[in-house]
């Protein structure tokens, strides 16, 4: 085997990671778990629904919306007429896949036959097979999926928000595309996009379980193409500012209680090496997570107050979303009075920016989040998928734990004051059918 495997210990979380890069550019992470009965593997490409326009080899290429998701559906078909899903099931494995705005991930878990299932994973993902007839059939299947999604409140409120926040960034458009856009997808489109984005240099393989790291590297080196191809560069159009295109949109759907989803644009530039590089960026993202948990978590003063008076009927949903070159804060909930809830959210943000977070509360939340992260390490699927996503973002998820102790309460306060600015905010609202606005 030609690759050098590096062993990295993370004593703060009790984990050991074996990592390296094949000659074809594939990054590999293996986390051995001796004595565990299950194993999990995730094979991901840095290709998602927002990557419609891209440059490779000096050529700019435009594709219809929905190609990445369409490819995910079609990858399970094998040239010999078999289907990878059926083969996994026969091997006792549980396979699946997903496509987001900037990643497509194929994965499986199993309790036996790991090597055979790993070979199958690498084989079918790297072996494209499409015909005009199978593409046409899939257009009908995905078209039905799209039409069913039109009735989804979660999808509606989310994409309405993105249409408020962004003028032209392709993240505005659904990952699955539209019935009209997928009609323009051909087998030639799929072959071309697979060749560009499914190059090992644009992919990562993450494995966890009672497995031999050298076996994983050896199988990957044997099964995958040897050529190292250029990494494509996505083009999302002209940069957009931090102000939203519009600030509010309401729509009526079949929901029992009014819902809102607020989005706030934030900065997520990559700092220079002099500024700390990726470690600083990861630190900053961690500050954001802590600040949002203190503001909107179910032990926060804001949530406690709004739930007690009946304004909220459930917990806040909140997160930071860094996808396809965008960075936004998302805050959502069901509310009997949406306008009151929004006013209280803005008022609490302004109060924290003035007065700061309580330091004792900060310490409790930090310890709670560390505990949550440690518990999440028990989920092999969560670890592998997070490792893959973080690799494409330039991080390693295991570096987070040590950074937790470097974050300060004052940093969280400054982050709120500098980022959660009303002028950068937009809100998408769903009202029950027949409800009075």
Image (cartoon, rainbow, N blue to C red):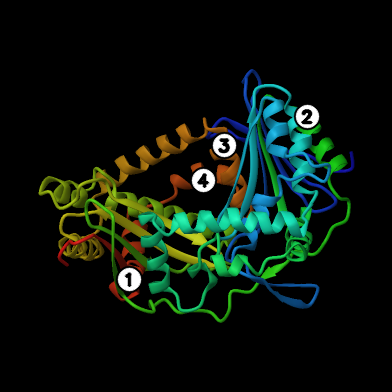
Residue 361 found in image quarter: top left
Q: Closer to us: mark 4 or mark 1?
A: 1
* Mark 4 to mark 1 CA distance (whole Å): 28 Å
Cβ atoms under marks 4 and 3 closer than 8 Å = no
Q: Which mark, by number, is residue 381?
A: 3
Q: Report crowding for label 1: few under 14, some 14 to 19, many 20 or more residues within 10 A (C-alpha).
A: many
Q: Which residue is pictured at 64% across the width and 35% down the height?
A: 108
Q: Which residue in the protein does label 1 denote?
A: 425
Q: Secondary structure at mark 1?
A: strand
Label drawn at residue 400: 4
Disc 3 residue crowd, few under 14, some 14–19, many 20+, Cα 10 Å: many
Frontmost of labels 4 and 2 is: 2
Tell me which label, 4 or 3, sits earlier in the chain.
Answer: 3
Q: Residues within 10 Å of mark 4 (few under 14, many from 20)?
A: some
Disc nearest the viewer among 2 and 3: 2
Q: Considering the numbered disc 3 on the image, is that residue within a helix, a strand or a loop?
A: helix
* Residue 319 placement (x, y as % from top left): 39, 54
Few, some or many C-alpha atoms within 10 Å of disc 2 (few <14, some 14-19, many ≥20)?
A: few
Alpha carbon distance from label 1 to label 2: 50 Å
Closest to the observer, 195 or 320: 195
Q: Earlier in the sequence, mark 2 or mark 3?
A: 2
Viewer-nearest residue: 368 or 386: 386
Q: In this rendering, which labeled residue sits more in front, label 4 or label 3?
A: 3
Q: Quadrant of the N terminus?
A: top right
Do the CB atoms of the residues marked 4 and 2 lie less than 8 Å apart? no
Q: Earlier in the sequence, mark 1 or mark 3?
A: 3
> What residue is rendered at 44% in x and 52% in y?
286
| Residue that mark 2 sits on | 116
The mark tally for this picture is: 4
């Amino acid at each position: 085997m030609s690759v050098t495997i590096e062993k990295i210990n993370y004593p703060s979380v009790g984990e050991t990671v074996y990592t390296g890069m094949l000659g074809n550019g594939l990054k590999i992470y293996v986390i051995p778990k001796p004595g565990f009965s299950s194993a999990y593997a995730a094979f991901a490409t840095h290709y998602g629904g927002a990557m419609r326009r891209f440059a490779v080899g000096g050529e700019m290429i435009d594709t219809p919306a929905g190609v990445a998701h369409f490819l995910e559906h079609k990858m399970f078909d094998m040239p010999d007429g078999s289907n990878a899903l059926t083969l996994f099931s026969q091997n006792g494995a549980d396979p699946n896949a997903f496509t987001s705005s900037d990643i497509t991930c194929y994965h499986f878990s199993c309790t036996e036959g790991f090597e055979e299932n790993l070979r199958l994973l690498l084989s079918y993902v790297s072996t494209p097979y499409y015909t005009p007839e199978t593409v046409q059939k899939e257009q009908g299947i995905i078209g039905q999926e799209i039409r069913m999604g039109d009735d989804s409140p979660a999808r509606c409120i989310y994409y309405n928000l993105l249409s408020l926040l962004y003028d032209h960034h392709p993240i505005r458009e659904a990952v699955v595309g539209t019935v009209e856009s997928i009609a323009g997808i051909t087998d030639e489109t799929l072959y071309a996009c697979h060749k560009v984005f499914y190059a090992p240099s644009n992919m990562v393989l993450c494995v966890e379980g009672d497995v031999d790291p050298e076996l994983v590297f050896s199988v990957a080196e044997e099964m995958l193409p040897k050529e190292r191809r250029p990494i494509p560069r996505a083009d999302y159009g002209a940069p957009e500012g931090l102000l939203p295109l519009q600030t509010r949109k309401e729509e009526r759907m079949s929901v029992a209680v009014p819902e809102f989803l607020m989005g706030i644009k934030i900065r997520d530039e990559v700092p220079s090496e002099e500024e700390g590089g990726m470690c600083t960026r990861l630190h900053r993202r961690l500050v954001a997570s802590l600040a949002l948990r203190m503001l909107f978590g179910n032990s926060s003063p804001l949530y406690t107050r709004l739930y007690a008076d009946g304004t909220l009927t459930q917990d806040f949903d909140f997160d930071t979303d860094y996808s396809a070159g965008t960075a936004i804060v998302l805050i959502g909930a069901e509310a009997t009075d949406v306008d009151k809830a929004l006013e209280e959210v803005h008022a609490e943000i302004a109060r924290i920016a003035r007065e700061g977070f309580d330091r004792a509360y900060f310490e409790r939340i930090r310890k709670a989040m560390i505990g949550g992260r440690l518990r999440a390490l028990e989920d092999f699927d969560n670890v592998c998928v997070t490792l893959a996503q973080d690799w494409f973002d330039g991080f390693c998820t295991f570096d987070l734990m040590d950074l937790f102790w470097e974050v300060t309460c004052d940093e969280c306060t400054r982050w709120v004051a500098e980022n959660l600015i009303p002028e950068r905010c937009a809100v998408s609202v769903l009202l029950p059918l027949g409800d009075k606005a």
